[in-house]
Amino acid sequence: MHQVTIALVAERAGVSTATVSRALSGSRPVSAESRRRVDRAAQELGYSGNSIASALRRSRTDTVGMVVPSIANPFFTSLVESVEHALHQEGMQLLLCDSRQDPAIEGAHLKALAARQVDGIIISPCHGTRSRAAIEATMAATPLVQLDRHVAGTDTDWVGVDDHQAMRLVMEHLAERGVRSAAFISSTLTNSSTELRLSGFRTQADRLGVATRDAWILLGEYSMQWGRSAANDLLASGPRPDAIVCADDLIALGALRSCRENGVRVPDDIKVTGFDDIDFSSLFEPALTTIDQPRERIAAEAVRLLANAAETGGTAAHIALAPALRIRDST
Amino acid sequence: MHQVTIALVAERAGVSTATVSRALSGSRPVSAESRRRVDRAAQELGYSGNSIASALRRSRTDTVGMVVPSIANPFFTSLVESVEHALHQEGMQLLLCDSRQDPAIEGAHLKALAARQVDGIIISPCHGTRSRAAIEATMAATPLVQLDRHVAGTDTDWVGVDDHQAMRLVMEHLAERGVRSAAFISSTLTNSSTELRLSGFRTQADRLGVATRDAWILLGEYSMQWGRSAANDLLASGPRPDAIVCADDLIALGALRSCRENGVRVPDDIKVTGFDDIDFSSLFEPALTTIDQPRERIAAEAVRLLANAAETGGTAAHIALAPALRIRDST
DNA sequence: CCCCCGGATGTAATCGATTGCCATAAATTT
DNA sequence: AAATTTATGGCAATCGATTACATCCGGGGG
């Protein structure tokens, strides 16, 4: 069966292709009579349009590309979901790419997205410095906004959460609960949010008189496995802190598991906090105290920034949304 | 800055656009000299191609669309991830759509994907009957494969797991563990896999002499919340079964939680099984006994089917892969 | 010495929708 | 009644890459 083209519709409706195009898109007024005939012809032929041809002509694809370090990480999953919803509302679609924490794959994805003429790119860079070259090459040709994290030295829009503020909420809450010493489990990654959370932790610990020590700063990766093994090490050796502050929920859930395995009671013996408020966190036992990132809003802002990118060629926007503390049973 | 076109490259290399196209795509031989000049010119100009134009001409987009009922459901998340990987290997990209369990949204997505001339569509239909019309309309124009579930009466390729076989593994395992009665918590959805799991449960219970009763068949939705509340009901009233068999891991995790809250010990007082083997299942306490679906292979097969769809116009393939039982602490 | 063949290249048509520009007709103004 | 505006509609160029077809060249065979 052959593709139903606008020309076919035009012929059947007894009008020109121009009129068909106008009738269907409403880009210019068309007589009621014409519209009716076009609609009917399109209906009868099952015309559904060819957005490729349309995209070529308009140089708009109504598509945005999104690149995340790992689709399977629940935090990114829910960002992807929110972005998809936001785009769907605007009649746009999502090209999803997984960089698998690899700057080379990430670069390839960015290049492919640019070649596809996407209207914009939303990216959570996988590396704090090695993602830079590809991002800079891409942003020259395509509107780009960084999500959650951003690469040092790049001048693009960014939307995320205020990490320092978040750590302040966490630490003040712990201090109120009587915590006098705390460990911090995070990732070795060098991206902005990872670094800001660590520096926020240090700053607030100092400010609130919460003791830390170098051996209590454990850097690995964002995963339950790492959280579990890091907490195992922590609990096995030396004095035990009053609290374990984790840079994301996966790590925290791993830490909770380790505590249980080691017979350390949470929150009585030790308090544990996470970051992200993924779905599982509230359903774990004990339910995890964590920072809720306003994901819907982050996604919506990102989409909005891309939509406006064409107009405001001006300076890059940095939007740090306010985090919220979700107090649960782990503290 | 203007788009760098093939014409620009041609001019700079001192050859025709035809030669540039041939040199870059290798579609036809080109002299070593020409190739060198073209490569250099492309390099210098930072030419990156316009896949929209290419797609229009070739009527291939190197894109497949994927429609899932819920991106956030960990099982679908991991299918999405696997599909993305498989596609990336083939140099293709993924347009991801979330139908949010709504046949209307699903239909709109399918229509949009068809209009975008995707090379193929991978869908997990959100409804057993109401997804049918849209799927049938779409499959006429675009290769389509259903994943995991399929809609009754549609004649498309399908890849999933052998649900009956899976239930047999679960029930035989439980019977071996001495289970004499079992409840089943599932979803009200009417899609194939939901129904096959239920009928498989019944068949195997009969065969193995495991007692069931109507009040022990609880249908709600695929979520932890439902699993928890269903198990609460179950544990609150009447005699308690030896085991709770769940139609997916989310339900099972909710059930596990309910057991703990109700002071029912797992696996001593009651055994619990899931289905899917999502990442969290092995990290929960107790770790969940469940069915591992070979997601990578499901994804790979789906992509392969789409790739071959053009050639084999023949009959639809139904590929039911073998499930594997993962025995853990919950039994 | 002429013809044929195959490799390399160029020219221009093509994919399908959009839109600038002009034409026509009807409505309104002067 | 003439002039001007307004409302519609059509023609054909256009987006950028691919490719059918034509061309050109040099070498081998007759």
Image (cartoon, coloured by chain):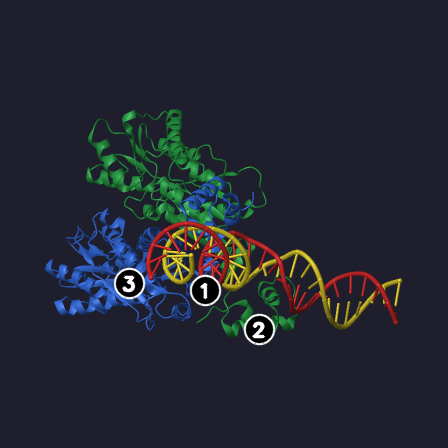
Chain colours: A blue, B green, C red, D yellow
Cα distance between the residues tagged 1 and 3: 22 Å
Cα distance between the residues tagged 2 and 3: 42 Å
Both labels 1 and 2 in a single chain: no
Q: Where is residue C2 in the image (x, y as percent from the top left)?
A: 86, 67
Q: Which chain does the numbered disc 1 sit on?
A: A
On residue A159, the disc is: 3
Mark 2, secondary structure of its residue? helix
Determine which quarter of the picture holds residue A203: bottom left
Determine which quarter of the picture holds residue A102: bottom left
Q: Which chain does the numbered disc 3 sit on?
A: A
Q: Where is residue B159 in the image (x, y as percent from the top left)?
A: 47, 41
Residue B121 visible, this angle: yes
Mark 3, secondary structure of its residue? strand
The foreground one among B43 and A118 is A118
Both labels 1 and 3 in a single chain: yes
Residue that carries the numbered disc 2 in the rendered image:
B11
Mark 1, secondary structure of its residue? helix
Cα distance between the residues tagged 1 and 2: 23 Å
* Amino acid type of the residue tagged 2 in the rendering: Glu
Both labels 2 and 3 in a single chain: no
In the image, which is nearer the foreground, mark 1 or mark 2?
2
Q: Does residue A116 lie above or below A26 as drawn?
A: below
Q: Position of residue B105 (x, y in %)?
A: 36, 43
Residue that carries the numbered disc 1 in the rendered image:
A111
Determine which quarter of the picture holds residue B217: top left
* Amino acid type of the residue tagged 1 in the rendering: Lys
Sort mark 3 into few (<14), some (14-19) or many (20+) by Cα contacts within 10 Å.
Answer: many
The foreground one among B255 and B130 is B130
Residue B296 visible, this angle: no
